[in-house]
Image (cartoon, rainbow, N blue to C red):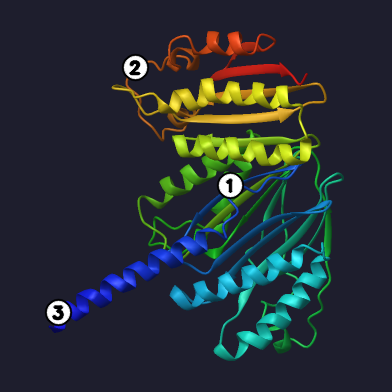
Amino acid sequence: TYSQQLETYQTQMEQDLRVSEQILNMNVPMDFVSPNLDSTLHFRAHHSIGGDIVLLRLSGEYSYIIVGDVSGHGISSALISTSTFSFVDNMLTRSPTVEAVVLSLNDFWTVNFRDLGYYATFFIGRVHNATGAMEYVNCSHPRPILYQNSSGMLTTLDNTVPPVGLFDLDEEAQVSRQWLKLSPGDKLALYTDGLLSEFPTPSRFSESDLHTLISRFSNLPHPIFHQFVLWNLRKMRRGLKPDDDEVFLSLSYSSLPKVGHYLNSMDQTLKLIRKVGRLNLGLNLPGVALGRLMTVLEETALALLARKRDDGPPPRVFVSIDFQPKRFNVTLLDANLYLAEENLLEIDGAVPPLEKQLPSGALQMVKNKVPDVQIKKIEKGLLFVCPLE
């Protein structure tokens, strides 16, 4: 019957969308690692699939930062973004300059998508990992915001050329890279316009609001900074959902390798462990040091999030790992305490210190397995200091 045919068609469409969503999610760089650039990404498609592009890639001495937004919505924009992602990803294996990426990308779009009426805004940056020297071209993308740790100043990285696919509409457009120098503690925030969608007053979230949040929280450790911006953004929206794809990417530069993560589930903890493993491919830590690090994470963060609690808020933890020449430090901070301070979470009664929330004997287990570790109680959490050898 007609109704059965319609139901079969709808089922097939839903399956196709699920497959498309899975393929698109493979393009999101959740496990990107760089020796000097820690990254945290929030990516949300308006529907199950979207047209925003985020590409982070380590190539030789450089880390590439590419964020784009394809015009339009739905399946067509998603297909174009996937094709574009693959094209650029292949190009980055040769460590090209940002000008070369922009020009090749525009040629690719001119040949394939211009006649279809599509264009895309892009921010394309390349960071020299060891020195922090960064070159970039902004193709009419929402302006990234740079926080400079030494001065506390915010700087926007302005547009320099038209959107990709529209270069021929501006005869005076010239692709020339801009330069800046990242210093330890500097943070860079990138986003797509879906983050600033026009919501009905008083739930509008503007570029000025984003600047305010970044300025307010920029002195916090990177994983806390990222989550605080997101949590407050959602609070200011008063429950209204965006009507476009949404990207918020933050990066923090450091002179020594560092990685941070917000953990609120077992899956997030396993992602952090994978991230550390990938970072170690470049660090080549002694096997004993990597084993010690994994022991600390498994006996603390993983054990905490695996534990069922009958009362109180579910466990949430900020984890930072930094590698010094002769040791590594693991910092665990109770995210629920930060949420409560920001009035984003109501907690009945006093929250026990983090060591009391761990399974019984967890810290002693760490000491038994890693005798050289120093465990220190700090404000809102714990610090583990362990020699590399």
Q: Residue 276's x, y, as percent?
A: 65, 36
Q: Residue 257's x, y, as percent?
A: 75, 35
Mark 3 Cα shell of 10 Å, populated few (<14), some (14-19), many (≥20): few
Disc 3 versus disc 2: nearer the observer = 3
Q: In the depicted view, which residue is nearer to us: 270 or 348?
A: 270
State if disc 2 and disc 3 touch (CB < 8 Å): no
Q: In the depicted view, which residue is nearer to us: 23 or 46?
A: 23
Residue in the picture at 50% in, 29% down: 317
The residue identified by callout 3 is 3
Q: Is residue 305 above or below residue 22?
A: above
Amino acid type at image mark 2? Gly
Whole-number angstrom distance, CA of label 3 to CA of label 2: 56 Å
Disc on the earlier residue, 1 or 3: 3
Q: Is residue 305 left or right of residue 176?
A: left
Whole-number angstrom distance, CA of label 1 to CA of label 2: 31 Å
Residue in the picture at 62% in, 11% down: 376
Does residue 26 show up? Answer: yes
Q: Residue furthest left?
A: 1
Q: In the depicted view, which residue is nearer to us: 272 or 19?
A: 19
Mark 2 Cα shell of 10 Å, populated few (<14), some (14-19), many (≥20): few
Q: Residue furthest bottom?
A: 115
Disc on the earlier residue, 3 or 2: 3
The residue identified by callout 2 is 349
Would you identify the image quadrant in which residue 332 lies?
A: top right
Q: Residue 249's x, y, as percent?
A: 60, 52
The residue identified by callout 1 is 212
Amino acid type at image mark 3? Ser
